[in-house]
Image (cartoon, grey):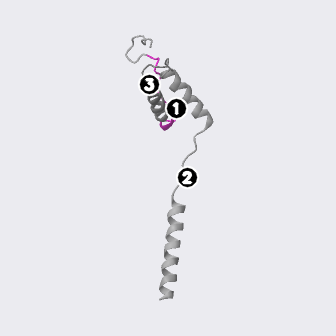
Amino acid sequence: MSRSLVAFAVIIASLKIVILSATSPAAALSAELAKKCRDMAIKAHPPVPAGSTAYAQAERDFFRECVAKNGEMPDSNQPSNGQPAKPQ
C-alpha cells in the first residue's frame, strides 16, 4: 500500500512541475507604457468638477484598453471623418 502511495505522490509532483514550468510569466507593464497610457487617458477623459457625471470608470477602461493595445490607441483629438474635432 505504501509503495502505491509513494508512486502516486511522485506522479502528482511530476505533473505539478510540468504544469508550472509550462506557463509563461505575465509580461510586466513598462513604466513608459504606463505613463503614455495614463497621459492619453487623462487627455481623453479630463477630470470634471465635483458633483458632475463620473468620469473615473471611463478613464480606467481607456487605460486598460491602451495597455492591452500596447499604447497604440487612436488619437481622440484627431478627426476621423475629415471634420474638426468637437471641444469637450
Q: CA distance from mark 3 to mark 2?
A: 35 Å
Residue bearing mark 2: 25
Q: Secondary structure at mark 1?
A: loop
Q: CA distance from mark 1 to mark 3?
A: 24 Å
Residues shaded magenta: 67-78
Residue type marked 2:
Pro
Looking at the image, residue 11 lies above or below residue 51: below
At 56% from the left and 46% from the top, the residue drawn is: 27
Q: CA distance from mark 1 to mark 2?
A: 21 Å
Q: Which circle marks residue 71 in the picture?
A: 1
Q: Residue furthest front?
A: 51
Reading the chain from its start, which is encountered first: label 3 or label 2?
2
For label 3, the crowd category at 10 Å Cα-Cα, with few meaning under 14, some 14 to 19 and many 20 or more, is: few
Q: Report how many numbered discs are placed on residues in the image.
A: 3
Reading the chain from its start, which is encountered first: label 1 or label 3?
3
Residue bearing mark 3: 54
Q: Quadrant of residue 39?
A: top right
- Considering depth in this image, is 82 or 85 the residue closer to the camera? 85
Residue type marked 1:
Gly
Look at discs 3 and 2 and give the one toward the viewer.
Answer: 3
- Considering depth in this image, is 57 or 32 the residue closer to the camera? 57
Q: Residue furthest left?
A: 81
